Amino acid sequence: MEADGEPIRFVDVLTMASAVASYLGASEVAPKHVLDAMAVLEGAVTIEQLGRRVSPLVPKPPGGTGVHERVRKFAQGWVTRPGNDPTCPLGPERLALLRDELAGLAGDP
């Protein structure tokens, strides 16, 4: 559950991951940003605790923040699995599965 009591959806995780990457000034959303997004949504940390915000005066990459290929493939694969509607709430079991799979991605070189 999100810190505000609302259920977490996969689309919320992806949206927050983009916000985390942008907040930190990353050029692309990496697996670590997705894991950090889950922690923010679950209330374990605040986005401010993840690192120092990059000034909005710092130029962003043309076209905005990109997505690391591993994150893109993971997200596309996740939503094509049976029962994984990106707009439906994720229960504790799916959140744990998502976290475990992302941890594996974040640990890959």
Image: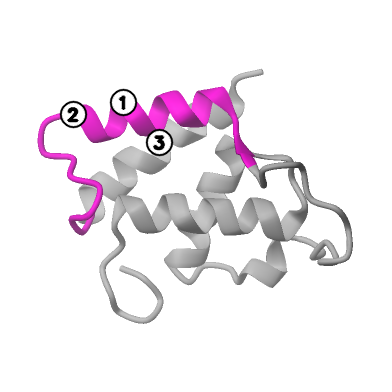
108 is higher (above) or lower (below) than 39? above
Q: Which mark is residue 81?
A: 2
Q: Amino acid at mark 1?
A: Gly
Kindly report the distance in space between the C-alpha atoms of the residues bearing marks 1 and 3. 15 Å
Residue at the farthest bottom position: 4
Callout 3 touching callout 2 (CB < 8 Å): no
Which residue is found at the position 40% from the left and 28% from the top? 74
Q: Viewer-proximal residue, 59 or 100?
A: 59
Horizontal side, residue 47 vs residue 58: left or right: left
Q: Which mark is residue 77?
A: 1
Q: Position of residue 2 (x, y in %)?
A: 36, 71
Which residue is found at the position 88% from the left and 65% from the top? 57
Whether 20 is among the magenta residues is no
Indicate the quadrant containing the C terminus: top left, top right, bottom left or bottom right: top right
Whether 69 is among the magenta residues is yes
Q: Amino acid at mark 2?
A: Arg
**Label 1: element kind:** helix
Q: Which mark is residue 100?
A: 3
**Label 3: element kind:** helix
Provide the residue span drawn in magenta. 66-90
20 is higher (above) or lower (below) than 66? below
Residue at the farthest front position: 63
Callout 2 touching callout 1 (CB < 8 Å): yes
